[in-house]
Image (spheres, rainbow, N blue to C red):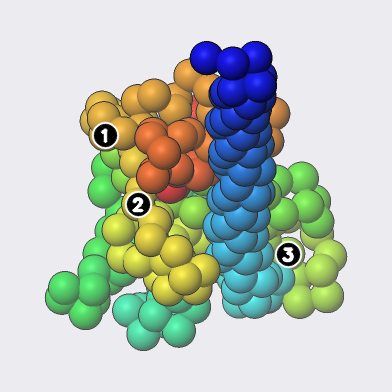
Amino acid sequence: MTLRKRTLLFSSLTLIVLLVAIYFVAVVVFQRGFAGVESDHVHADIERVRQAVNQEIDSLTASNRDYSVWDETYAYTLSPDGDYHEMIDFETLSNLNVDLFAILNREGELILSTVADPVEGDTVEAPQALRAFLVANSVLVPPLGQPKSGLMSIGGDLFLFASRPILHNDGSGPPAGTLVLGRFLDEEAIAALSDLTNLNLRLHLLSPHPAAPEVLAVIPKIVESPDGTAIHVYDRDAIGGYLLLRDINDLPAAIIG
Protein backbone atom coordinates (compact mmCIF):
# COMPACT_ATOMS: atom_id res chain seq x y z
CA MET A 1 0.00 0.00 0.00
CA THR A 2 1.40 3.35 -0.99
CA LEU A 3 1.90 6.16 1.49
CA ARG A 4 -0.86 8.12 -0.22
CA LYS A 5 -3.38 5.29 0.23
CA ARG A 6 -2.37 4.73 3.83
CA THR A 7 -2.78 8.42 4.55
CA LEU A 8 -6.24 8.45 2.95
CA LEU A 9 -7.27 5.32 4.89
CA PHE A 10 -6.06 6.75 8.17
CA SER A 11 -7.84 10.04 7.50
CA SER A 12 -11.05 8.21 6.60
CA LEU A 13 -10.94 6.08 9.75
CA THR A 14 -10.26 9.15 11.86
CA LEU A 15 -13.21 10.94 10.28
CA ILE A 16 -15.50 7.95 10.86
CA VAL A 17 -14.46 7.70 14.52
CA LEU A 18 -15.00 11.44 14.93
CA LEU A 19 -18.47 11.29 13.35
CA VAL A 20 -19.46 8.33 15.52
CA ALA A 21 -18.27 10.17 18.63
CA ILE A 22 -20.18 13.30 17.63
CA TYR A 23 -23.29 11.20 17.05
CA PHE A 24 -23.18 9.59 20.48
CA VAL A 25 -22.47 12.90 22.19
CA ALA A 26 -25.43 14.44 20.36
CA VAL A 27 -27.68 11.54 21.40
CA VAL A 28 -26.67 11.89 25.06
CA VAL A 29 -27.15 15.66 25.02
CA PHE A 30 -30.53 15.32 23.31
CA GLN A 31 -31.71 12.65 25.75
CA ARG A 32 -30.63 14.72 28.73
CA GLY A 33 -32.31 17.78 27.31
CA PHE A 34 -35.48 15.84 26.55
CA ALA A 35 -35.46 14.32 30.04
CA GLY A 36 -35.11 17.80 31.52
CA VAL A 37 -38.04 19.12 29.50
CA GLU A 38 -40.12 16.06 30.40
CA SER A 39 -39.25 16.52 34.08
CA ASP A 40 -40.36 20.17 33.93
CA HIS A 41 -43.69 19.11 32.40
CA VAL A 42 -44.25 16.48 35.09
CA HIS A 43 -43.43 18.95 37.85
CA ALA A 44 -45.91 21.43 36.37
CA ASP A 45 -48.55 18.69 36.38
CA ILE A 46 -47.84 17.95 40.05
CA GLU A 47 -48.36 21.62 40.91
CA ARG A 48 -51.68 21.59 39.06
CA VAL A 49 -52.79 18.68 41.24
CA ARG A 50 -51.69 20.55 44.38
CA GLN A 51 -53.67 23.61 43.30
CA ALA A 52 -56.74 21.46 42.61
CA VAL A 53 -56.56 19.91 46.10
CA ASN A 54 -56.13 23.35 47.67
CA GLN A 55 -59.16 24.63 45.74
CA GLU A 56 -61.23 21.79 47.22
CA ILE A 57 -60.11 22.80 50.71
CA ASP A 58 -60.81 26.47 49.99
CA SER A 59 -64.35 25.63 48.90
CA LEU A 60 -64.89 23.72 52.16
CA THR A 61 -63.67 26.73 54.13
CA ALA A 62 -66.06 29.03 52.26
CA SER A 63 -69.01 26.66 52.79
CA ASN A 64 -68.14 26.35 56.46
CA ARG A 65 -68.47 30.08 57.01
CA ASP A 66 -72.09 30.03 55.83
CA TYR A 67 -73.02 27.86 58.81
CA SER A 68 -70.38 28.65 61.44
CA VAL A 69 -71.02 32.41 61.43
CA TRP A 70 -74.75 32.12 62.06
CA ASP A 71 -76.92 32.77 65.09
CA GLU A 72 -78.91 29.56 64.52
CA THR A 73 -75.77 27.42 64.75
CA TYR A 74 -74.54 29.48 67.71
CA ALA A 75 -77.75 28.96 69.66
CA TYR A 76 -77.89 25.23 68.88
CA THR A 77 -74.30 24.72 69.99
CA LEU A 78 -75.02 26.33 73.36
CA SER A 79 -78.34 24.51 73.77
CA PRO A 80 -78.55 21.48 71.44
CA ASP A 81 -82.28 21.07 71.18
CA GLY A 82 -84.96 22.13 68.72
CA ASP A 83 -85.04 21.20 65.07
CA TYR A 84 -81.68 22.59 63.92
CA HIS A 85 -80.26 19.11 63.38
CA GLU A 86 -83.18 18.29 61.07
CA MET A 87 -81.96 21.01 58.68
CA ILE A 88 -78.68 19.17 58.25
CA ASP A 89 -80.15 16.54 55.96
CA PHE A 90 -78.86 14.79 52.85
CA GLU A 91 -80.00 17.59 50.55
CA THR A 92 -78.16 20.17 52.64
CA LEU A 93 -74.94 18.17 52.59
CA SER A 94 -75.30 17.58 48.84
CA ASN A 95 -75.79 21.30 48.20
CA LEU A 96 -72.70 22.03 50.29
CA ASN A 97 -70.84 19.21 48.53
CA VAL A 98 -69.70 17.78 51.86
CA ASP A 99 -69.82 14.35 53.44
CA LEU A 100 -69.38 15.36 57.09
CA PHE A 101 -71.08 18.00 59.22
CA ALA A 102 -69.94 18.03 62.86
CA ILE A 103 -70.29 20.44 65.77
CA LEU A 104 -68.22 20.45 68.95
CA ASN A 105 -69.10 22.68 71.90
CA ARG A 106 -66.71 24.77 73.97
CA GLU A 107 -65.82 21.77 76.10
CA GLY A 108 -64.84 19.78 73.02
CA GLU A 109 -67.89 17.53 73.27
CA LEU A 110 -69.40 16.32 70.01
CA ILE A 111 -73.04 17.39 69.89
CA LEU A 112 -73.73 16.75 66.19
CA SER A 113 -71.95 14.40 63.78
CA THR A 114 -73.74 13.73 60.51
CA VAL A 115 -72.37 11.86 57.50
CA ALA A 116 -73.97 11.62 54.06
CA ASP A 117 -74.98 8.16 52.83
CA PRO A 118 -75.23 8.50 49.02
CA VAL A 119 -76.39 4.90 48.61
CA GLU A 120 -79.49 5.46 50.74
CA GLY A 121 -79.81 9.15 49.88
CA ASP A 122 -79.92 9.96 53.58
CA THR A 123 -77.72 10.96 56.49
CA VAL A 124 -76.43 8.80 59.33
CA GLU A 125 -74.47 9.40 62.49
CA ALA A 126 -70.73 9.44 61.93
CA PRO A 127 -68.97 6.13 62.65
CA GLN A 128 -67.50 5.67 66.11
CA ALA A 129 -63.90 5.94 64.88
CA LEU A 130 -64.63 9.29 63.25
CA ARG A 131 -66.47 10.62 66.29
CA ALA A 132 -63.60 9.60 68.56
CA PHE A 133 -61.10 11.26 66.23
CA LEU A 134 -63.02 14.54 66.22
CA VAL A 135 -63.18 14.63 70.01
CA ALA A 136 -59.56 13.61 70.53
CA ASN A 137 -57.93 16.05 68.10
CA SER A 138 -57.84 19.50 69.63
CA VAL A 139 -55.84 20.65 66.60
CA LEU A 140 -59.19 20.80 64.79
CA VAL A 141 -60.35 23.59 67.10
CA PRO A 142 -59.28 26.93 65.59
CA PRO A 143 -58.59 30.16 67.48
CA LEU A 144 -61.10 32.99 67.18
CA GLY A 145 -61.51 34.02 63.57
CA GLN A 146 -58.86 31.65 62.24
CA PRO A 147 -60.11 28.71 60.14
CA LYS A 148 -58.21 25.44 60.14
CA SER A 149 -58.10 23.10 57.17
CA GLY A 150 -56.23 20.14 55.79
CA LEU A 151 -56.46 16.37 55.72
CA MET A 152 -57.79 13.92 58.30
CA SER A 153 -56.68 10.28 58.13
CA ILE A 154 -58.93 7.91 60.04
CA GLY A 155 -58.52 4.16 59.77
CA GLY A 156 -57.84 4.16 56.05
CA ASP A 157 -60.40 6.86 55.26
CA LEU A 158 -59.25 10.30 54.19
CA PHE A 159 -61.20 13.53 54.64
CA LEU A 160 -60.39 16.98 53.38
CA PHE A 161 -61.70 19.22 56.14
CA ALA A 162 -62.25 22.81 57.18
CA SER A 163 -63.08 23.92 60.71
CA ARG A 164 -64.10 27.33 61.98
CA PRO A 165 -65.19 28.79 65.32
CA ILE A 166 -68.95 29.15 65.68
CA LEU A 167 -69.77 32.85 65.99
CA HIS A 168 -72.71 35.26 65.82
CA ASN A 169 -73.98 36.62 62.50
CA ASP A 170 -71.74 39.67 62.88
CA GLY A 171 -68.68 37.53 63.52
CA SER A 172 -68.53 38.34 67.22
CA GLY A 173 -67.80 35.83 69.97
CA PRO A 174 -66.92 34.31 72.23
CA PRO A 175 -66.98 31.13 70.13
CA ALA A 176 -69.76 28.75 71.06
CA GLY A 177 -67.78 25.84 69.65
CA THR A 178 -66.37 24.54 66.39
CA LEU A 179 -67.97 23.51 63.10
CA VAL A 180 -66.13 20.89 61.05
CA LEU A 181 -67.02 20.17 57.43
CA GLY A 182 -65.40 17.24 55.65
CA ARG A 183 -65.28 15.74 52.20
CA PHE A 184 -64.11 12.20 51.48
CA LEU A 185 -60.89 11.98 49.52
CA ASP A 186 -61.56 8.67 47.80
CA GLU A 187 -61.49 7.16 44.33
CA GLU A 188 -64.55 9.18 43.29
CA ALA A 189 -62.90 12.40 44.43
CA ILE A 190 -59.68 11.47 42.65
CA ALA A 191 -61.66 10.80 39.46
CA ALA A 192 -63.08 14.32 39.73
CA LEU A 193 -59.56 15.72 40.19
CA SER A 194 -58.46 13.74 37.13
CA ASP A 195 -61.21 15.34 35.07
CA LEU A 196 -60.35 18.78 36.42
CA THR A 197 -56.63 18.50 35.67
CA ASN A 198 -56.86 16.27 32.57
CA LEU A 199 -54.44 13.86 34.24
CA ASN A 200 -54.69 10.15 34.98
CA LEU A 201 -54.44 10.20 38.78
CA ARG A 202 -54.47 7.49 41.42
CA LEU A 203 -54.66 7.70 45.20
CA HIS A 204 -52.15 5.61 47.15
CA LEU A 205 -52.82 5.28 50.89
CA LEU A 206 -49.71 4.90 53.03
CA SER A 207 -51.53 3.24 55.93
CA PRO A 208 -52.97 0.90 57.02
CA HIS A 209 -52.57 -0.65 53.56
CA PRO A 210 -49.14 -1.09 51.95
CA ALA A 211 -48.42 1.21 49.04
CA ALA A 212 -48.61 -0.10 45.49
CA PRO A 213 -45.31 -1.52 44.15
CA GLU A 214 -44.81 1.35 41.72
CA VAL A 215 -45.00 3.82 44.62
CA LEU A 216 -42.68 2.04 47.04
CA ALA A 217 -39.63 3.39 45.23
CA VAL A 218 -40.92 6.94 45.58
CA ILE A 219 -41.71 6.95 49.32
CA PRO A 220 -38.16 7.49 50.70
CA LYS A 221 -37.62 10.40 48.31
CA ILE A 222 -40.99 12.10 48.67
CA VAL A 223 -41.18 12.09 52.48
CA GLU A 224 -37.85 13.96 52.57
CA SER A 225 -38.81 16.39 49.81
CA PRO A 226 -39.29 19.97 51.11
CA ASP A 227 -42.25 20.55 48.78
CA GLY A 228 -43.74 17.06 49.09
CA THR A 229 -43.19 16.15 45.44
CA ALA A 230 -41.16 13.52 43.64
CA ILE A 231 -40.42 12.56 40.06
CA HIS A 232 -39.41 8.99 39.34
CA VAL A 233 -38.04 7.67 36.04
CA TYR A 234 -39.01 4.03 35.67
CA ASP A 235 -37.42 3.51 32.26
CA ARG A 236 -36.73 5.45 29.07
CA ASP A 237 -40.45 5.43 28.22
CA ALA A 238 -42.04 5.96 31.65
CA ILE A 239 -41.77 8.82 34.12
CA GLY A 240 -44.09 9.46 37.06
CA GLY A 241 -44.90 12.51 39.16
CA TYR A 242 -46.18 12.28 42.73
CA LEU A 243 -47.62 14.58 45.40
CA LEU A 244 -47.44 13.73 49.11
CA LEU A 245 -50.41 14.57 51.32
CA ARG A 246 -49.78 15.01 55.05
CA ASP A 247 -52.51 14.88 57.69
CA ILE A 248 -53.27 17.44 60.39
CA ASN A 249 -50.54 15.93 62.57
CA ASP A 250 -48.01 16.42 59.72
CA LEU A 251 -47.72 12.67 59.15
CA PRO A 252 -47.53 11.22 55.61
CA ALA A 253 -51.02 9.94 54.77
CA ALA A 254 -51.29 9.41 51.02
CA ILE A 255 -49.67 9.99 47.66
CA ILE A 256 -51.43 11.19 44.53
CA GLY A 257 -49.76 10.30 41.25
Which residue corresponds to the image point at 49% horizontal and 78% vertical from the top-left?
Answer: 96
Residue type at numbered disc 2: Arg
* Mark 2, residue position: 202
Q: Is residue 83 above or below residue 114?
A: below
- Across and down, in percent, residue 236 comes to 41, 39
Which residue corresponds to the image point at 84% horizontal and 65% vertical from the top-left?
Answer: 172
Q: Are marks 1 and 3 in contact (CB under 8 Å)?
A: no
What's the distance in space between the residues labelled 2 and 3, CA to CA? 38 Å
Name which of mark 1 and mark 3 comes first in the sequence.
Answer: 3
- Across and down, in percent, residue 84 comes to 46, 76
Residue type at numbered disc 3: Leu
Residue type at numbered disc 1: Ala
Disc 3 packing (10 Å; few <14; some 14–19; many ≥20): many
* Mark 3, residue position: 167
The answer to whether 26 appears left or right of 124 in the picture is right
* Mark 1, residue position: 212
